Image (cartoon, rainbow, N blue to C red):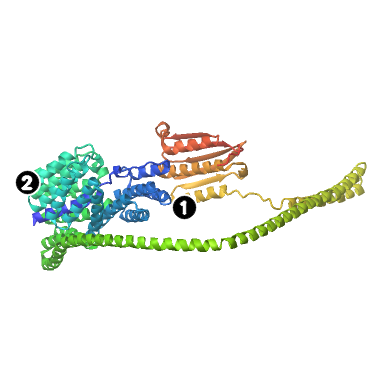
Amino acid sequence: MKAKYFSYILYIFLIIYFGCTPKDEKEVSFTSSNDSLSIYFSLANDFSLPKNVRSTYSKKAYNIVVGDENDSLNRVNLFKVANRYYNINDWKEFNKTVHFVLENSERVNDTSSIIKAYTYLGDYYQSQTILDSSFLYYYKAEKMYSELGDNFNLAKTLINKATLQYRAGDFLGSEKSVFSVLRIIKNEKNTSNILYDAYNLLGIIYSELGEYDNAIIYHNKALTMSDDEAIPKVFQSKATTYNNIGFLYLNLKKYALAQTYFKKGLEENNLKIQKPALYAMLIDNLAYAKFMSNDTNKLPGLFYEALKIRDSIKLSSGIFINKIHLSEYYSSVKATSTAISFAKEALSLSKKANIPRDVLVALKQLSVVDPENASIYSKEYITINEQLQKEERSMGEKFSRIEYETDKIKDQNSILEDQNRNLIYIFSVIGILGLFTYVIKAQQSKNKILLYKQLQQQANEDTYNLMISQQQTIDVNRVLEKKRVAQELHDGVLGRMFGVRMNLEGLNPFDDALAVEQRVIFLNELKNIEQDIREISHDLNREKSELINNFVAIVSDLLEKQSDTFDPVLISNIDGAIKWDLLINSVKINLYRIIQESLQNCNKYAQATTIRVELKKREENLVLTISDNGVGFIKKNKIKGIGINNMISRTHECNGTFDISSVKGEGTTITVTVPIEQKQIPI
């Protein structure tokens, strides 16, 4: 039972290793002048950032790339986005991105991108434990790589195929595929990654077959390869191999030796950050080796530490095995109710994930810790085990059938291509005959077409003359209208104003009640004249309206979204005396981006409870102030940040000054001063 159980653990590890290994950046070279896209790609692959933050940057990169033209660079970028989703195990977005780039590749018949998409889809279906679909895509890629003579990628695809065969229980078939890989890359260069994967998988296969001497040989070869500088350290290959060797000695009941290798794995640098799943597995395995050797030091604490990590990254397979181990531990210390509880949780988890192997392990454990209901668990175990054995036996046959049917379809496609080629020849001959017929008929009607064009040209000339005449009429009417307005101003308004002025001058010597009354009458007349002038002015400028400046509305919308989305209290003040029409568009855009960048910095780093944004007019300048009461920072340590440098650059573009002041623990204040009136430079 124990040997079979340890083999099962190796199976779980294989899923984790091949499902969590980051995509090699060398697969997708990228060159772009788009700085934002480059930054998003870099941040999305920063393993020190939380998973949700990396996901956000991946989506931003996808939103930029998805709208670009379907060229080779665009497809490279799409694969790069897919890699980012792969490295954070976001399988839904990974699948969507790969299908999108596959459609684009098929549309322009880009063979290399089509093959790469096939391998990515094989990865996706393998992660979802849909082995037949995964095998189909790997096999398609294998055939195309073989036709192209691309041995490097052919070998990588065969490694994936061998992994599937192992998972389906076809150990000998998997072994055969791995040795095919070793033959293919025998004379190839830069194959360290492939050699490591091949040796690692052979070690696991031989361990499953009980050939422990061979398993040790190939695990040691993998350990040697893990020192190769060509293998990125982020892959944590050495820790992976230490874990495998530890498994092997655990299977051989050499618990002290197993602990030694698990501890070596845990000593690898940055393991917890780069490969938390592997880190948790090493802790869990170390705890289990201690438990099997009756060493209860740090138990069950190590089990719970591993479980906490696996819970945080939602690694269901690891959570399951952790709970089985805890059930075994509590059973050994006679805490029966706790042991049963953990075993039932493991059973529920395995049924929810629909993994028959997990269900069998959980049922076996329950039958041990809950003997009163052992018969019920055993009956269910037998039913599921028989079904699983049938599925595993049929899986190898299914893989062979997929290969046969794929080859058959390929042969049929070749026949169809020949038939289509013959049809093209036939239709080409018919088309040429049709073309001759068309030319003859076209020549016969040529004179009629020329005559029609002459008549049409004459009609066009008449229409043009009519348009000229209409334009002249419009110009004459415009001149007459201007003369009418000028005459009305001269004869009407000016005449009335002259009369009022003369009457007011005549009243200057008098200061009696009658003179005051008459002055009031003449002042009212001036108001009437003022209204007449206003109406004439409105008539002259009816087509001209004040441009609506929506800058304040855009900024207000940004501030409203900030208040709705984040916890800090936002206080804003926009001076109503600012004449926004005097600011050119480039200044408004840069001010908006500075506000936006500052708010993002507050949300990410400041830990503030209050943020204040003010836009004020100070003499001939506009002053933007953004302050918070957050943690602040040491200025000399942060001045090289991308965000702050962007704000400084934008301020200089506006011919303004930028100032930032911050005290550790007392908050930060940013002040941007720009002149309101600037030379109008179109943006």
Badge 1: few (under 14), some or many (20 or more) residues near its Cα, within 10 Å? few
Numbered circle sitting on residue 213: 2
Mark on residue 159? none
Q: Which quarter of the rendered picture does the N terminus lie within?
A: bottom left
Query: In which quadrant of the rendered image does the C terminus lie?
Result: top right
Which residue is located at x 57 percent, y 45 percent?
574
Where is residue 661 drawn, in percent x and y?
A: 47, 34
Q: Amino acid at mark 1?
A: Asp
Residue 278 in view (yes/no): yes
Residue matched to label 1: 564
Camera-nearest residue between 645 and 105: 105
CA gap, disc 1 to disc 2? 64 Å
Q: Amino acid at mark 2?
A: Asp
Quarter occupied by residue 448: bottom right
Crowd around label 2: few <14 · some 14–19 · many ≥20 (10 Å): few
Viewer-nearest residue: 608 or 530: 530
**Label 1 vs 2, first from the N-terminus:** 2
Q: Is residue 471 above or below residue 380?
A: above
Q: Is residue 77 left or right of residue 502?
A: left
Q: Position of residue 184 (x, y in %)?
A: 18, 46
Taking 426 as reference, is 559 above or below it? above
